[in-house]
Amino acid sequence: MALVELERAGFLKFVISQNVDSLHLRSGFPREKLAELHGNSFKEICPCCKTEYLRDFEIETIGLKDTPRRCSDKNCGARLKDTVLDWDDALPPEEMNLATEHCRSADLVLCLGTSLQITPACNMPLMSIKNGGRVAIVNLQATPKDKKASLVIHGLVDKVIAGVMSKLSLRIPPYIRTDFVQLTLRHSLKKKCVRWTLRVTSIHGLRAPLPFLQSVKVSFPERPDLKSVVLKEQPFSLQRETSMNKPFFMLLTLNFSDGCSCLSSSIGWPVDFQKRKDSFVRDRALVLRELYSAAQRESCIGQQEILERENLPRAETSIHGIVTNIVRYDTEDEKLAPPKNDLMNHSRSNPAKRHVEGTDCHSSLPKKLKYFLKDKKLNC
């Protein structure tokens, strides 16, 4: 998250990553300022139109193979491919070209937490030196490129970057995780009754997994004649028959898996088969910004917002965004309370948060790094 804030402040121009964990994109770092040399375990790409699809689950294959899904563009529809390289695969030329271009033009390249032993990536930082740039290396162990660097710090990247952020008077923003779920209610008439099916699925397709959901409880608070049920296996699905003339209120309690700081979140759904609701699509970016702002301001998790709803003659579908986690970087002089779940009034016993134990960022910044940063912007 420190890199996200450095980019927002105009110091960081580009990131070159050899990781495949998708953390940079999940943090909110701009895709156009990121080169993922070895691919992304959570991303698929269309080989025809080059559209990228970022998933909330790990793609089933590696080695640029076909996946079970297709491009959603109606004019394309090609089979998607994973993006993670196998041992024999060449580095993606688009990513390599961007990375090379930025290394050559950078006035400072930061090498953070890398052994600088894997070619050709390990030689890319040195391209800046030929054009008057400098290289700074932060790694626990020595690297083969230490002698050519202007600055070498053998230490923890988290601690060093926290010091840099303090020196630049910047705060490390929290990571706010938002997950998405699609709810579908299909029905058919059967004399005076309605046979309906509820499905809780991924926004990436009916067969895509929902790794953040452990179970779904479906209850009917205003209808004691309708029995509650807990759906424990994916795909989450419930079939019932109810009277056409009796509307009901359905409460869905989404129970989250490990990795989410809150235990659950609830979505209410008023159902009346004789009335048709309006369809709409909200500005997703705006809704998510509002969710992020509320979560950061209140240190609260579990809240959700509906992003869109489609109402057809025999089906209703809605997509919801849910804040499931807040991860903060805490310094010794700024201890923050763990995130709260106002909806359920409890959270997991081990809330996820990062600590720099016993560290004052103002005093822990290495002297040589203070001097190095005195008149230097982190243009990378």
Image: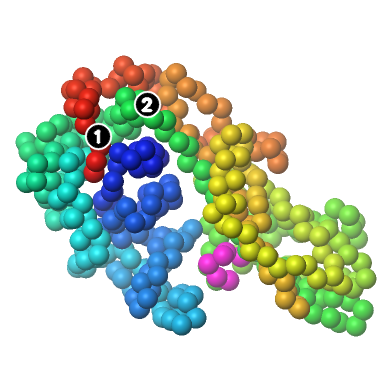
Residue type beneath disc 1:
Lys
Q: Quadrant of the C terminus?
A: top left
Q: Which residues are magenta?
A: 201-206
Q: Which residue occupies 17% across, 36% down?
A: 136
239 relative to 19 in the view: left or right: right
- Does any portion of residue 38 appear in the rendered image? yes
Chief secondary structure of the magenta portion: loop
Q: From the top left corner, tell me how far across and down residue 157 is, in percent.
A: 29, 34
In space, the residues marked 1 and 2 are separated at their CA atoms by: 13 Å
Near-viewer residue (376 or 28): 376
Can see residue 144?
no
Q: Is residue 353 left or right of residue 5?
A: right
Which is more toward the observer, 306 or 338? Answer: 306
Dot 1: element: loop
Q: Position of residue 368 (x, y in %)?
A: 18, 23
Residue 223, relative to residue 163: is it above or below?
Answer: below
Camera-side residue: 338 or 5? 5
Helix, strand or loop at label 2? It is loop
Say above or below: 26 vs 241. above
Circles 1 and 2: CB atoms closer than 8 Å: no
Q: Which residue is mark 1?
A: 377
Q: Which residue is mark 2?
A: 169
Relative height, residue 115 to residue 316 (above, below): above
Would you call the spot at circle 1 few (<14 residues within 10 Å), some (14-19), or many (20 or more)?
Answer: some
Which residue is found at the position 59% from the left and 58% from the top?
A: 283
- Quadrant hosting residue 356: top left
Instruction: Using the image as rendered, state which of residue 102 and residue 199 is in the foreground.
Output: 102
Earlier along the polypeptide chain: callout 1 or callout 2? 2
Is 338 colored magenta in this rendering? no
Q: Report the amino acid beneath label 2.
A: Ser
